[in-house]
Image (tube, rainbow, N blue to C red):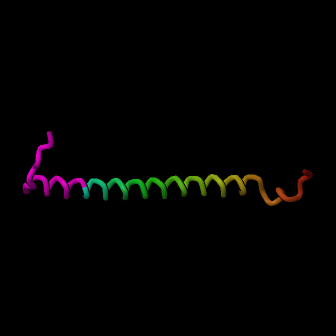
Amino acid sequence: MVLMVEPTPNNDKQAAGNAEFASRRRRRSVALGLVLGAIVLIFYVLTIVKLGPNIFDRVL
């Protein structure tokens, strides 16, 4: 048995709230991705700096 629900102003508000929630979640995910990328870049640069310029002069 399928019940038909007519749109009410409350359902419209809830749909707008869900869209706002999804937008906030997406912005938060992008921000976390950027922070993670920055941390990876910092570790990469620090590793290269710590190894120094003689990294290419070593015997393999």
Residue 13 part of the magenta segment:
yes
Q: What residue sits 27% from the left and 53% below the top?
A: 21
Residue 17 part of the magenta segment:
yes
Q: What residue sits 11% from the left and 48% below the top?
A: 4
Find residue 28 and report its image quarter: bottom left
Find residue 44 and report its image quarter: bottom right
Q: Which residues are magenta?
A: 1-18
- Residue placed most toward the observer, 10 or 27: 10
Q: How far across and down, in percent of the image, does residue 16 sit?
A: 19, 58
| Image quarter in which the N terminus is found | top left
Q: How far across and down, in percent of the image, does residue 25 sit?
A: 34, 53
The residue positioned farthest toward the front in the image shown: 1
The residue positioned farthest toward the right in the image shown: 59
- Counting every numbered tag in the picture gives 0
- Residue placed most toward the observer, 2 or 25: 2
- Residue placed most toward the observer, 59 or 14: 14
Q: How far across and down, in percent of the image, does residue 29 sit?
A: 41, 54
Instruction: Please indicate whether residue 15 sits to the left or right of residue 56 in the image.
Output: left
Instruction: Please indicate whether residue 11 sits to the left or right of residue 24 in the image.
Output: left
Instruction: Please indicate whether residue 16 sits to the left or right of residue 47 in the image.
Output: left
**1, above or below 26, in the image:** above
The residue positioned farthest toward the top in the image shown: 1
Q: How far across and down, in percent of the image, does residue 23 sit?
A: 31, 58
Instruction: Please indicate whether residue 33 sits to the left or right of residue 28 in the image.
Output: right
